[in-house]
Amino acid sequence: MSTAIEIDDLSFAHTGADLPALERVSFRISAGESVALLGPSGAGKTTLLALLDGRLQGWSGRVSVLGAPLDPDRPPPSARRPDTGFVFQEFALVERSTVLRNVLNGRLGRMSPLRALMGSPTKHDLEIARTALADCGISDLAERRVDSLSGGQRQRVAIARCLAQEPRLILADEPVSNLDPARACEILALLTGAARARGATALFSSHQPDLARRFAQRIIGMRDGRIVFDVPTSELNDNATAELYREVEPSPGIGLRAVS
Amino acid sequence: MAFRGFGGFATSGLIATAILWSFATTDVEFSRLLSAGPRIADFLGRMFPPDPTVMAEIKKGSAETLRIAILGTLGAVILSVPLGILASETMVSPAVFRPIRTLLAFIRAIPLILVAMLMVGAVGLGPLPGIIAVAFHATGMLAKFYAEAIDGVSRAPIAALESAGAGPLVRLRYAIWPQMAPVVARDTIFRFELNLRESLILGIVGAGGIGFYIQTYVRSFQYDKAASVTIAVVVMVIAIEAINVALRRRFA
Ligand SMILES: Nc1ncnc2c1ncn2[C@@H]1O[C@H](COP(=O)(O)OP(=O)(O)O)[C@@H](O)[C@H]1O
Ligand SMILES: [Mg+2]
């Protein structure tokens, strides 16, 4: 089976941060897998996904995405490649544009710059955008402006934009943490289902163990920039997740002194 | 917030001194001040009834004021696009936007009428100095507004397009511009309204427009004609405001 993501001994610190956001991270994801990155806030999930999307610079280790190695010294966006799609927690849509326009924006990287600037998508581009809208169940919203949509509808638009890129890898950073539980399940089912239908690899982050368990075949647990476990979903036990979310134990005496 | 301690005492002293100094050095005789009431009443009496025969002058003057405001605003927009980009912190480094912002603040500090007088001196009488003055003066505010519009844009959709493989110009067109457009439209209309109001008086210093007739009629004691022009100006200001309210609603 071919490899979608290969990471070997990756470390990275944000400029100005004392502690590294990623520390000696290694894993490999095969093409077509659906994997969840699980971990509490601050674990390094966003950092890892942004790095895989080619938006960070100056890390150490080896990273390759869809068979092509990333260069840690190239200023971002180093991997401005249409075949990796990204779904953002806060949707990242152009609010005043229509749903169709936002989905067509996913095609911009696939067009010649001139065609993109002229704003003239081909029949093929439109067809792909319409298919993406239909797959996300929002064909009837095509002409609506995004600022009139609900959160769940917005994330559907964002996924449709991602699908319009014809991605072979879908990265999603907490795609459902702004949504209510019922909406969250719908959206994750849509995301992982669309990836599977296209034979694409999906890597999504979440801080909710039950969602990761339900929608991923494999779960990578992160904490403090390190990988704590990396197991098939069927082997995930509650002790492991409990360890992931264990409170940092306060040093003795601090609690008392803080009150006085 | 009362004046407190020595600082407060000094401030009160300073204000009192300023008022006394103004009275002492202004050549206002009390007799003239007392007769000012009746004189103003007399003046207003001579303005009444307004002379309606100056309709042609009013039309000609307001058309010229409108042209000055339109072309002045156009000039300001043309100057403000590059200056606005150079004054925005998302587009350029502090080494660029700081001095540009200072320059814009200086421009804003110079009153329009002063710029107009200087321009009349530079290029002669007529609407041209008025247009240049309005364009220059308005740029101080409009370029600042444009910079704020650029800086107010949400970054997330820009990052999303970048991630999808779109280049910088394409991102400007599809992620930055759609977000800025309504702000730019609103700011430009707002500035046009100010330009129109402010250019009503440019004629007084010979920089074209309807103000020229007010000046002429007052100088030649034709107060009834001056009154007609004044009424026309007031009507124009109200009309501008009404149109503006409607436009602003359109761009919400
Ligand atoms: N731009 C940044 N500058 C400095 N530190 C950052 C930045 N972004 C994230 N961090 C730090 O890196 C660590 C990992 O953050 P992040 O990747 O956002 O975690 P997660 O997405 O799992 O919540 C945190 O300690 C966070 O404070
Ligand atoms: Mg995060």
Image (cartoon, rainbow, N blue to C red):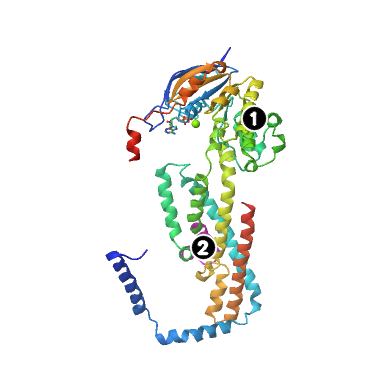
Q: Nearer the viewer, residue A188 or A139?
A: A188
Q: Check the residue under mark 1 and report the chain it is in.
A: A
Amino acid bearing label 1: Glu
Asked if residue A90 can be seen in this view, the reply is yes
Marker disc for residue B41: none
In this rendering, position of residue A219 left or right of residue A165? left
Residue A125 locus on image (x, y percent) = 68, 30
In reply to whether residue B169 is colored magenta, the answer given is no
Q: Nearer the viewer, residue A136 or A216?
A: A216
Residue A184 locus on image (x, y percent) = 61, 31
Look at discs 2 and 1 and give the one toward the viewer: 1
Asked if residue A55 can be seen in this view, the reply is no
Q: Which residue in the rendered view is the most extreme toward the left?
A: B6
Residue position for label 2: B129
Residue position for label 1: A186
Going 54% across and 69% down the picture, which residue do you hit? B203
Q: Is mark 2 within 8 Å of ligand 1?
A: no
Q: Check the residue under mark 2 and report the chain it is in.
A: B
How many numbered tags mark residues here? 2
The quadrant of the rendering that contains the N terminus of chain B is: bottom left
Q: What is the secondary structure assignment of the residue under circle 2?
A: helix
Vertically, is A156 above or below A195?
A: below
Highlighted magenta segment, given as a residue range: B119-136
Going 62% across and 24% down the picture, which residue do you hit? A192
Residue A226 locus on image (x, y percent) = 44, 22
Residue B159 locus on image (x, y percent) = 53, 34
Going 43% across and 84% down the picture, which residue do you hit? B33
